[in-house]
Amino acid sequence: MENNKKLNLTPIEDLISEDFGKVGTPERDAFEMECNAFIIGEQLKDERLKAGLTQEELAEKIGTKKSFISRVEKGRADIQLSTLVKVFRGVGREISVRVL
């Protein structure tokens, strides 16, 4: 923290709060939900590519449409936990949920 002051740097939390509100506000909650959806989508895409599957192949394997896999990978799908488990099992991975 002391180095930040010497370099006149602003902590990332301050920048995020400035743009999206303080923790617990509706705007900040929406931002954090979008971030989580993006992260899950990137993880799915990475695992799908490691498994050597196209979006279409994964969709067929789990009984859904390619457009759904695309939306999940782009962080634009509100996905149920049971569906998330099914999607990751389709690429040979298991997921766990942690309550913080």
Image (cartoon, rainbow, N blue to C red):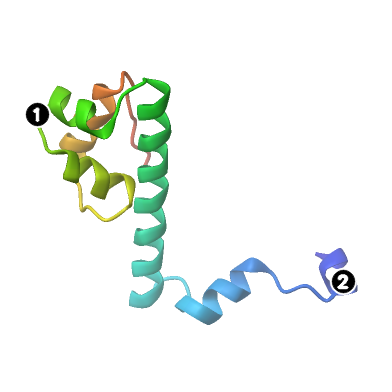
Residue at 53% x, 76% y is: 17
Q: Which mark is residue 42?
A: none
The residue under label 1 is which amino acid type? Gly
Seen in the picture, residue 10 relative to 55 is either above or below; the reply is below
Give the mark, 2 or 1, whose residue is nearer the N terminus.
2
Q: Rate crowding at label 1 as few (under 14), some (14 to 19) or many (20 or more) other CA atoms within 10 Å.
A: few
Q: How far across and down, in percent of the image, does residue 26 sit?
A: 33, 76
Position of residue 52 measured from the top left corner of the image (x, y, whole percent): 36, 21
In the drawing, does residue 66 fall left or right of residue 88?
Answer: left
Query: In x, y percent, where is residue 70?
Result: 26, 45
Q: Is disc 1 placed on a helix, strand or loop?
A: loop
> Percent position (x, y) of residue 31?
39, 67
Q: Which residue is mark 1?
A: 63
Query: Is the residue 84 above or below the residue 47 in the image?
Result: below
Relative depth, front residue between 35 and 72: 72
Q: For this view, does 89 lie left or right of residue 47?
A: left
In the rendered picture of this protein, how many numbered marks are placed on residues?
2
- Answer left or right for 20 relative to 55: right
The quarter of the displayed image where residue 64 is located: top left
Residue 98 sits in which quadrant?
top left
For the question of whether residue 80 can be seen, the reply is: no
The residue at 31%/24% (across/down) is: 53
SS for tag 2? helix
Looking at the rendered image, the disc whose residue lies closer to the viewer, 2 or 1, is 1
Above or below residue 80? Residue 63 is: above
Which one is nearer the viewer's eye here, 68 or 40?
Answer: 68
Which numbered dot is residue 7?
2
Q: Are circles 2 and 1 on residues that touch, CB within 8 Å?
A: no
